[in-house]
Image (cartoon, rainbow, N blue to C red):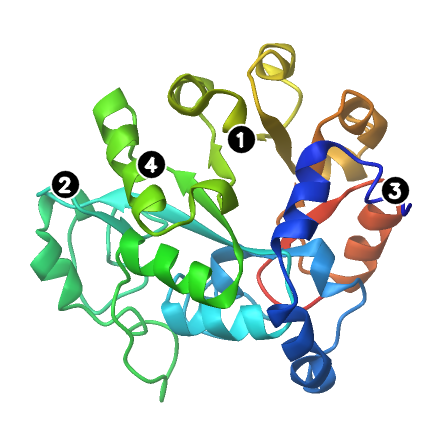
Amino acid sequence: MTMLERRSLLGSAILLALGGSSRELSASATASQSFTVPPSRIFAHRGFGTNGAPNALSPENTLAAFRRAASLGVAGLETDIQATRDGVPVLMHDATVDRTTDGEGAVRELSAAQIASLNAAGRFGPGAPAEPVPSLASYFALCRELGMVALPELKAARRPEEVARILTLAEEAGMADRVVWSSRRLRTLEIVAEMRGGRSRLALIRNDLRDFGTFLQLPGEKMLLLRATALLQGRVEAKEVTGAGVSLAAWTVNQSEVARRLIDGGCDFILADGPV
């Protein structure tokens, strides 16, 4: 049994959920990419597409980005959920569309139809093919098609009915057991746990170990998404997390030597904006 397989149930479950398709693709797809750590230890942050990141491959949080990252054999596809004025969950990191699209305005003040008309590649760079802003439903459908683990951050969902709407979309797509739900709000993860119980896969986003003890009490499989500097500066030891039966992923890591150091130091996964 490898070190990664001895980690908490979540780490093992993710590896099992990946299936063979992405790994079969990765042999040829990674030939032109440079990885210091195995891509199966990397979650593609915003689909390996964070605008402005030196190693980004595609416009962030687009289906094209997710498809390309999946072809490289990554562990899963990370994204961010916002809600439109009419309550439709869409993929957008920021509260506004200004930074990544050719539009302006707050996501919550625009309708789903208005969001769908925007070019999500509008700020990526000259010559980038136009890409729509994906709905959460289309993201789940693609993850299912590609056999990928989904790692969405619940940014806008605070009330139980908002969380329930998102969980229903995952269930309708056949992705309920292939999603790791992440949030900076412990209460949001508690709501997910209340709705899914022991079937939950939860990821708490933190800069340190604040609320870690409370997080441990939630049912289901758990992962801590920890800012990389907390580990690199010695403020948190990897074994403090993994020793409690929780998987550990460091974010956001875009330097090869740092990625290698974190994996060698006990991280199960890293989040990166592109190949490292």
Which residue is rendered at x = 13% and y = 68% of the image? 117
Residue 228 appears in view: no
- Tell me which numbered mark, 4 or 1, is placed earlier along the sequence: 4
Dot 1: element: strand
Residue kind at label 2, given as amino acid type: Gly
Between marks 2 and 4, how big is the CA–CA gap?
Answer: 14 Å
Of circles 3 and 4, the one toward us is 4
- Residue 90, percent from left and from top: 26, 51
Q: Which residue is mark 1?
A: 202
Q: Which residue is mark 3?
A: 265
- Residue 144, percent from left and from top: 44, 59
Q: Are marks 3 and 4 in contact (CB under 8 Å)?
A: no
- Tell me which numbered mark, 3 or 1, is placed earlier along the sequence: 1
In the picture, the quarter occupied by the N terminus is top right
Q: Are marks 3 and 2 in contact (CB under 8 Å)?
A: no
Q: Is residue 265 left or right of residue 160?
A: right
Which residue is rendered at x = 53% and y = 59% of the image? 148
Residue 153 appears in view: yes
Q: Which residue is mark 2?
A: 87
Residue kind at label 4, given as amino acid type: Leu
